[in-house]
Image (tube, helix red, strand yellow):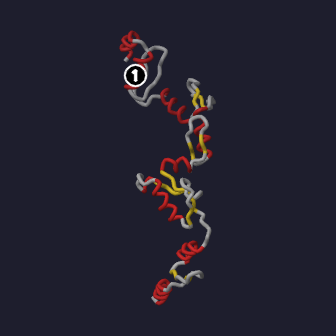
Amino acid sequence: MLFVLMAHQALMEKRHVCSECGKTFKFLSLLSTHKRRHQDDRPFSCMYCNSTFKLEWNLKAHARAHFSTLPPRRIRFCTCCNQTLPLPLYNRHVRPFRCDECGAAYALKHRLAVHSVKHSQLTRFNCSICGRPFKYKNARKTHEAVHFPLADNNTTCPVPGCMRGFRHRSSRNRHMKTVHNETTLAESDAYR
């Protein structure tokens, strides 16, 4: 109990003293922030009007004036470059890896690489049943499920020679209407 009392008393005493003006602080971090007021260094600059500030907080407050029509939740501060930006600009700002084809931006380089496959003509994944090529493994897996329907025989195309399988009867019916003509559709009713 004595230790807790001593720790409390130490906090109540303002042990950290500014060597410039003598002001005292409970915490070293508060003293460090205060000391910037005595320095000429102004490391935080506004990208919109070139005003400079000693404290990050002052820059944030100043930047809000540039975006006075925006609510505070739509404004972000970049800790890498000390800029305050409206949310849409900030989102682009923190995603430096940009696709040359469509402009999509990513925070990580490997995410851009995965995205770039979308624009290439390269097809690395072929269906093991029919050989149809796919750019993405998951797209091939989804397609291969067509060859192995989960439900009963009513989900397989009844047209002789087609035998395409579907997971749902509605998908099979749509296939029948778009791929096979009406006469074939009528003839295929006998195969149900």
Front residue of this view, candidates 124 and 37: 37
- For residue 56, above or below residue 150: below
Residue 29 occupies which quadrant of the picture?
A: bottom right
Residue 189 occupies which quadrant of the picture?
A: top left
Residue at numbered disc 1: 174
Q: Residue at x 39, y 28 (%)?
A: 168
Q: Is residue 116 left or right of residue 160?
A: right
- Residue 99: where, in percent of width, then height? 60, 39
Q: Residue at x 47, y 90 (%)?
A: 2
**Quadrant assignment for the C terminus:** top left
Q: Is residue 113 left or right of residue 90?
A: right
Q: Residue at x 57, y 62 (%)?
A: 52
- For residue 125, above or below residue 190: below
- Residue 84: where, in percent of width, then height? 52, 56
Q: Residue at x 40, y 17 (%)?
A: 177
Front residue of this view, candidates 132 and 19: 19
**Quadrant assignment for the N terminus:** bottom left
- Residue 10: where, in percent of width, then height? 50, 86
Which amino acid lies under the numbered mark 1 shown in the image of this protein?
Arg
- For residue 32, above or below residue 106: below
Front residue of this view, candidates 186 and 68: 68
- Residue 144: where, in percent of width, then height? 52, 29
Q: Secondary structure at mark 1?
A: helix
